[in-house]
Amino acid sequence: MGTATLTKDPYNLIITGVGGQGNVLASRVLGNLLADQGFSITIGETFGASQRGGSVMSHMRISAGESWSPQIPQGQADMVVALEPIEALRVLHTYGHPGVKVISNTRSIYPVGVISGDNKYPSMDELKTIIEDLTESVWFINATDAAMKLGNPIFGNIMMVGALAKTGVLPIDRDGFEKVMLRTMGEKKTPVNLKAFDMGAEMIT
Amino acid sequence: MSQLYEGKKGEKVLFMGNQAIARGALEAGVSVAAGYPGTPSSEIIENLADVSKEANMYVEWSANEKIAVEVAAAASFAGLRSMCTMKQNGVNVASDFLLHLVLSGTRGGMVLVPCDDPGALSSINEGEARHFAKLLEIPLLEAGDFQEAKDMLKWAFELSEEIHNLVMFRSVTRLSHASGSVELGEIPHTEPQAKFVNNGFILDPLEGPIVSAPVGYKHGLQQDKLKKAEELFEESPFNTYVGPENPEILLITSSGATLYSREAIHLCNAKDKVGLLKLGTTFPLPSKLIAKHLKTTDKVLVVEEVLPFMEENLKVLAQELAPEVGQKTFYGKRSGNIPMTGELNPDLVATALATLLGDAYSPQDQEYQTKAAQQVFFNAPVRDLTFCPGCPHRASFWSIHNVLAADNREGFVCGDIGCYSMAFLPSGFSTLKTLHAMGSGTGVASGFGKLGQFGLDQPVVSVCGDSTFFHSGIPALVNAIHHKSDITMVILDNSGTGMTGFQSHPGLPVDAQGNESPALDIPTICRALGATVEVCDPFYPYKTQQTFHKLLEAPGAKVLVLRQICALSPEKKGKKQFEMSVDEDVCLGENCGCNKLCTRVFRCPGLRWDEEKKVATIDEVICAGCGMCAAICPSGAITRKEVA
Ligand code: SF4
Ligand code: SF4
C-alpha cells in the first residue's frame, strides 16, 4: 500500500460524457489506479441508456478508509472530468460549488434536438466563459481531435485520465496507469493507451 | 475480469456489485447458473460464463426467466448448488414455476438473484421483486454494500441448504452497477456429482419424487422453513447497528439505501443522535432483534427503495411487540418523509433526517445553484435518447413509419421491451403506440387484429426483437395465427440481445459459454407456424417498404423479418462499412424533402447541419458508416464509398 494522501476525504470525482465515449472505462481505470494505492473506492455509474446518445455520468468516491455512497451528494463534486463540454455544465448544475475544478474536452457531440434544428448548441467560446464562471479552475483540451490522430476518437477518454494525472489533484501517475493497463488490457493494447495518457498529460499546462 | 476467478483469498479488489455477486457464487461453489439478460442483472451471468470452464460450471442464457429458474432447479434437485438471475420483471415471468418450486422445496443450495431498478434507470417500471419473497414465502436477503454482496451471497447458499428451500437475494441498480472495494475469500475446488434421487417415499424431501403435493402438508412445511430462517436471522452478522445506546431517532434501512443513510447521518452531522440499524435479512424480520432496538427509542425512520415493504412489515411487528416495547412513531414513506417513487440518494435521506431532527438541510450554495440552473436552462440542450448512429432500428422504423403514413388508414405499431422501445420517441419517428412487457407487442396486436368485427379498420403492426421472439414472442404469434388475427409482426433481428450487451439467444450459433450451438432460424420457425414470411435488410429502405406495404395488404398473421446486425455488435463496432460524404453542391438543404430531410427528419446523430453553408455534413467521429443516409437522400447528395 502506498503512502499517498488525499487533499480531501472523501474526494469526489465525476466523469461525465455521452454514451459511447468510454466514460465507464475511464472510471474503471481510475478506480483501479486508486484502489491499487490502497484507497477505498466506490464508483456509481449510470449506464443502460448509455449507448444511445444519452448523458452518462460516473461518480467516484475516493477515501482512505470508508465506503461511501455511489451517489455524490448535491453540490459536493471536487473535480469534474467531462468528455463533452455541455455535460460539464449539466453536472455543475447539480454537483458544482464555487470551489469545483473541471477538465473538459472541447469536442461537442450534438444532441438529436440540435441535429434536427429544434435546439441550439452554444458556441465553444460561450461555453468556456460559462464554465469558467462556475468553477475555481478549469482546463479545456481538445482530446477528441488528438485521439483521432491516434486513430480512434475513443482514446479521448484515456487522454482525459492522463490530463487528470497531470493536474496533480489526485495521487495517480504513469507507472500506476501502466500497471493497470497491463492487467486489464494486456500487453498488446497498453502502448497505445500509454501514448494517449501522455498526450493528455501534455495538454495540461 | 480475471481477478474474478484468479483473485486470491485476502486480496482487495475493485469489483462491480454484479462481479461481487458472481464471486460470492464462486466462493460458494456454485455449479449451475442460468438467467435471462436484463439491466441491471446481466453481468452476473456474463462474468460467470467467462470463467465457467475454469470453475467447472454450467452457465446459460435461458430463453426466458421461467426457464432459467427451471434449469437451475433441476441442478438443485440433482444435489448441486445453483442460481438464477434476472431483472425485476423477470420474477413475474418466473413466478408461475416459483410458486410450485417453493412448495416442492430444493436440495442443493439454490439462490434466486433478482436485480431491481429503483428509479427505472434502465427499465420502464420500478416493480420490486421483494414482494415476491412474501408471496412465495421464502427468505429475503439484501446486501448493504459491495463486500456484503459477495459474503452474503455465499451465505445464501448455506441458508438454502439448511432449510431446503429457495432463498432470494435481491440487488438494486446502485449496487449491481456500482463498484466498490471487496476483500476476496477462497474458491473451493470440489468436483460435485449430480444425481437425481427420486425413488424414496413421497414425503421424503431428499429422496422422494419432487412435487408440490400434498399442498396442505407442503405449505405447512414451507412455513416451518421460513420460521427456521427467521431464527437464524436473529444472529445474522448481516444485521448491524451503529450509533448511540439510546438514539433520538432509530434509522432502519437495508440494501443500497444503507450507503445513502450512512452518508445522510454524516451530512447532518448527527452521529450522536441517530442510530443506524442496517438489516440484511429483510423477510421475515428477526423479531427479537427488532424488539431489542425498538426498546431504545420512540422515533423510527425507515429508509428503503421503492415501496414501503420493510416499513409495513416493521409496523406489523411493532404492533405485535407493543406490549413489550411500547408505542412507536414511524416515519418513512407512509408519513411522506421519504418519497414513494424513484430511487433515493444521500440528499433525499439527509433532508428527511434533518426535518425529523428539527434542522434544515440545504445541499447546495443557493446563489451558485441559481446561477448554474439558469445557464443550464438557456445553454445546455437536452440530450434525448436516440438510436445509435448506424442503428438498424432507425432504418426499420423509418420504413415502417413512412409506409403507415402513406397508407393513410391510421395504422399503428404495438411494441415491447428492447432498444426498439425508443421508437415511441421522435428518434423512432414516434411510431410505437403501445409499450408493455416483453412479447406483449404481438400479444396486444393479436387482440387488436380481432377487432375488425367491431369496425376497427386500422392496420395493426407489432415489433419484437430476436431475443424477445424466443423469450415470449412465439406464443403471441401462435395465438395470432391460430385466431386468424390480422396483424403484421415485424421482427427486428439485430443478431443479439442488443439492449443488454449482446448476450446469446437460441437464434445464435453460440451459447453463453462460447460453445458452438445450433442456431434456430426465425423465418423457418414462423413459416412452420403457418405465417407468411418475408425477410429484408432495413438498410435497403425501398425494398423494405415495398415488402412491408404488400404484407400490410394481406389478411391474417404475417411476419416481416428485418435483419441487420446491431451497430454495436462485436463484429461491427468501430468498423465502418462505408466512408460517407456529402456533396455540398448537390445538397438541397432547406429545400430538401420537408426541409433538411436527413438531419431534421431522419435524425441520425452522425449527421450535422452546417449553419453557415446551409448543407448537411457527416460527423466523422460519430458516423458509424452504415450507408443508410445515402439511401434516403432524395437528391443523391450523400455518397458512400466502401471501406477496404
Ligand atoms: S437529405 Fe440529402 S439533400 Fe436533403 S439535406 Fe440531407 S444531404 Fe442535403
Ligand atoms: S452512414 Fe449516415 S445513417 Fe449511417 S451512421 Fe453515418 S450518418 Fe448515420
Image: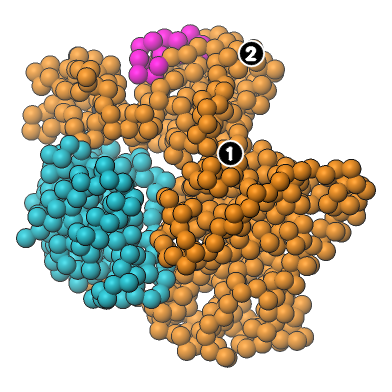
Chain colours: A cyan, B orange
The residue tagged 1 is B60
Location of the C terminus of chain B by quadrant is: top left
Q: Between residue A109 and residue A182, name the one nearer to us.
A: A182
B54 horizontally vs B579: left or right? right
- Above or below, A79 relative to B58: below
The residue tagged 2 is B528
Residue sitting at x 60%, y 71%: B238
For marks 2 and 1 on the same chain, the one whose residue lies earlier in the sequence = 1
* Dominant secondary structure (helix, strand or loop) of the stretch shown in magenta: helix
**Ligand 2 is in which quadrant of the figure?**
top left
Secondary element under disc 1, as helix, strand or loop, is strand
Q: Position of residue B414 (x, y in %)?
A: 53, 29
Q: From mark 2 to mark 1, how far is it between C-alphas?
A: 27 Å
Task: Name the amino acid type tagged 1.
Answer: Glu
Residue B59 visible? The answer is yes
How many marks overall? 2
Circle 1 chain: B
Give, as a single range, the part of the protein colored magenta.
Answer: B537-552
Which of the numbered marks, if any, corresponds to residue B47?
none
Disc 2, ligand 2: is the CB inside 8 Å?
no
Residue sitting at x 50%, y 11%: B534
B46 horizontally vs A155: left or right? right
Residue B89 visible? The answer is no
Q: Position of residue A132 (x, y in %)?
A: 12, 62
Determine crowd level at label 1: few under 14, some 14-19, many 20+ residues with C-alpha closer than 10 A: many
Residue sitting at x 85%, y 55%: B219
- Above or below, B275 relative to B566: below
